[in-house]
Amino acid sequence: MISIPVQDLNGSSSGSYEFDPTDLVKGEINRQLLHDVVVMYEAGQRVGTVMTKSRGMVRGSTKKLFRQKGTGRARAGNARTPVRRGGGHAFGKKNRDYSYRLPRKAVRLATRMALLSKFQDEQAVVLSGWGLDSPKTKSVVAGLSALGAGGTSTLIVTDGIDSNVYKSARNVPDVQVLPASDLNAYSLLRHRTLVVTTAAMDSLLGRGAAVPA
C-alpha cells in the first residue's frame, strides 16, 4: 500500500492519500516498454519537412552534353546528372512522416507504470486542490514553491480541464498542465516532479470517469 500526505497550497498536510500499487500495475515496471513508448512520442514530434531536388527537378536541358566518342573526354549525359555540379541528388531527401503507434494497451500500461514510478521514486505530490477563482500566476508559483516543486521541471495534473490553472501556469518555465484524461508516459517521465490533485488521482485510479491514455 502506498500512502502519501495530501498537502494544500501552503504546504501544510491535511491527511493522506492511499492506494494499492496493483490498482495501477499488476507486476513489475517494464523499463523496456517505457523506453519504447517514449521513443514513439519523440518520433511523432520529429519534423519531416525536408526535401532536395532529384535530377528530374533540376533546371536544365536534357540534351546530351557532347557526342559519345571522339572528344577524348569521359562519357557524359545531360547536365542534370548527380555526378556534375548543379545536378540533382541521386537519393534526395523527401518529406517523411516519422510517427507510428504502438498498441493501445501497451501505451495505456506504460502510462500507469510511469505514474506508479513517480510515487515509488518519491517524486509525486498530492494536492487537495488549487482553488483558483481566476488566473493568477503568482499563486501557482508560490504554491509550487511551498510544495517543494519550485525551480524544477513540474507536471501539474488536474481533474478535467481547469482553465484557471492552465492560464496561471502556461508562462512558468518548465511547467506543464494536463487534465487526467490526457496524461501520458512521455509527459510523466520528462518532468522531474508530479503535482496531482486528489480528484485527478481518483480519476486515474478508476474511481472517476477519466482513464489515462
Image (cartoon, grey):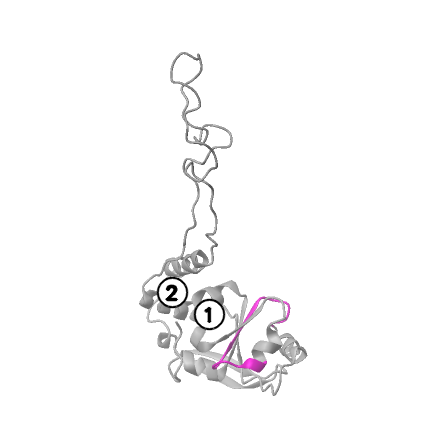
**Decide: marks 2, 1 in contact (CB < 8 A)?**
yes
Amino acid at the residue labelled 2: Ile
Q: Nearer the viewer, residue 113 or 162?
A: 162
Question: Residue 211, percent across and down?
Answer: 38, 77
Query: Which quadrant does the N terminus fall into?
Result: bottom left
On the picture, is 137 further left or further right than 61? right
Amino acid at the residue labelled 1: Gln
Tag 2's secondary structure? loop
Question: Residue 94, percent across and down?
Answer: 43, 46
Count of picture labels: 2
Q: Residue at x 61, y 84 (%)?
A: 12
State whether residue 36 is above or below residue 142: above
Within-10-Å neighbours for mark 2: few <14, some 14–19, many 20+? some
Where is residue 173, by image quadrant?
A: bottom right
Q: Nearer the viewer, residue 209 or 74?
A: 74
Region of the chain picked out in magenta, as a range: 149-164
Residue under pointer 1: 120
Using the numbered discs, state the Cα–Cα distance from disc 2 to disc 1 in whole angstroms.
11 Å
> Is residue 121 inside the magenta stretch?
no
Residue under pointer 2: 29
Query: Which quadrant does the C terminus fall into?
Result: bottom left
Q: On residue 5, which mark appears? A: none
Q: Tell me which label, 2 or 1, sits earlier in the chain.
A: 2
Question: Residue 191, percent across and down?
Answer: 53, 65
Tag 1's secondary structure? helix
State whether residue 66 is above or below residue 109: above
